[in-house]
Structure formats: C-alpha cells, structure tokens
Image (tube, rainbow, N blue to C red):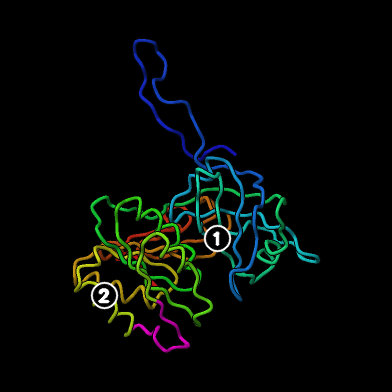
Amino acid sequence: MGSTTTLPGAMDKSTGGCSCAPWSPSIVAELAEVIRNHPVNGEYRHLVVSCSAEAAAAQPGQFFQLLCPQPPGEAPYLRRPMSLYGAFPDKGQVEFLYKVTGAGTRGLDMLKPGDRLDIMGPLGVGYTLNPGLRHIVAVGRGAGLATLAPLARAARLNGTKVTAVFSARRPDLVVSVDLFRDEGADVVVVTDQEQTSGPANVERILRGLIAEGRCDAFYTCGSSRLMRVQQRLAQEYGLPGQVAMEQQMACGIGLCYCCVRDFNVNGEIVNRRVCWDGPVFDLMEALP
C-alpha cells in the first residue's frame, strides 16, 4: 500500500518540473516476518517483527493495524489496532505488547518465528517531545504501559529526564519497568494489590514531583481516573500534557468514523476521530 500523504514540493519554474524530493510512502501494508512472540508475564505477550524502513520509522504513540491469523473455528474479520511498543530503524523491527482477549489476539498468539504477519502502519498522530523539556512524567496503567514505552528512548535522545508512574492490579502484571530504567528513567510502581494505586495516592506522588521541579509536562495513557488527576494538576500548575486515547477502531485511517469521541476545545464539545486526529491528544481537551 502507498502512503496516504505525499511530500509536497515547489514547482521549479526554470525547468517546469518539480524540485521536491522523490515521493516516498509514510504508511505501508506489508507481510512482516515474526522474530519473537513470547509471554512476558501472566497476561501479556511480546511480539517482534522484521519490517520495512517505513514501518520501523514509527513514532511513540502511533499504532498499526494487524491482520490477525484465524484461530481454529474463528474468523476475525477486521484488522486489530495495536499500539507501538518499540520501533528500531537500525534493526528494521517493530514491537507490540498484547493481551489475549479475543479471536484476533488468539490468532496472534499462534504466531511462531518465521511466520508472516500482515501489518499496516504506522498510523495516527503520536506523542511530541519539545526540545526544551527538561523532565516529563509518564503515567500509565494496563495497556497504557505498552503505549508509553517508546517514550523512554525518545526522551533520552531528546535529552529529557523521565519519571514513570506505572499502575497495575498486581506487581507481576507491571510491564515496561526495565525498559524505562535501562533508558535512565526513574520508575514508581503502584498496584491495587498493595493499595497504592488509588487516585489520591497517585496525586500525592505527582504533587511531590512537581514540587521537586521534576514535571514539565504529563504524558499518559490507560486510565481515565488518573487522567483526571493529571488534568486537575495541569490546570492548577499551568503544565502541558498529552494523552493517548483508547477506542474501538475499524479502518484505522479515518474513513469509517467508528472511533469518534467527544473533546472539549475551548469550552466547545467537538467530535474527533481517534485513529486519524489522534490517538494522542492535548491532555486538557480529552474527556473520560
């Protein structure tokens, strides 16, 4: 598949031709080769595929549409949207973290090294890192821990320090901790089991980071309750923030309007497509 966008260029009047760079795709559909597909804990599996340079150029917060294999007796009809867990242009690989919950992910669970997987992407608008950011706070829960993962490496390359606050039901279900720490981030883990994951305690942690000058912006995904805490603090302290929204999707390219959500933009409720206008949005415009 070719790109949904092209690189515009100016017309060269002396030659009557175009002086722009040659057209190249930014979104591709291809058969990627499975490198690894193994469990990382009792719920999540780590899928690594070899892919084209275009796919491997995916940015934090973007996603892919995966055409999952068919498990025996089941027939997943639509592609499954899957957040990017990692992109490595130097190795020509992208990574995904998924939980087996339905026919599509049961199909992914069947994949073995050497198998082929039809992937389409990278899709959507991802996170942005202002070069002036000194220290950001990443707050995630559940699948949001996978979505936030590529921020760790991007922040290090940007010269930005990261403190990650990760929430899960139990300590053994927390993912991305080693990944963030390997990139130099500080990680705080809160869990339901330990009764540390409530909004009040997370707010206490975040207020402490703000007081210490370790929060220039919020980056979040995976919990509406924790998003509201960050919105309140962002408004109180005048901090920017970005949130990756989760939503059911069908096409992934903005055509079907399956993923429309409401957003509050300057006091007005507007409709936006999560797959096309996002999935990353301004934190203060997002509604639960």
Q: Is residue 190 magenta?
A: yes
Q: Position of residue 158 (x, y in %)?
A: 32, 51
Q: Count of labels shown?
A: 2
Q: Residues within 10 Å of mark 2 (few under 14, many from 20)?
A: some
Which residue is at 37% across, 59% downward?
A: 281
Q: Residues within 10 Å of mark 1 (few under 14, many from 20)?
A: many
Q: Position of residue 283 (x, y in %)?
A: 32, 65
State the SS at label 1. Answer: loop
Magenta: predominant secondary structure element? loop
Write down the region rendered in magenta.
Answer: 189-199
Q: Is residue 287 magenta?
A: no
* 188 lies above or below 126: below
Q: Between 30 and 266, which is closer to the camera in this rendering?
A: 30
Which residue is at 64% across, 57% downward?
A: 36
Check disc 2 and report the residue beneath it: 232
The answer to whether residue 93 is left or right of residue 107 is: left
State the SS at label 2. Answer: helix
Q: Quadrant where the N terminus lies? A: top right
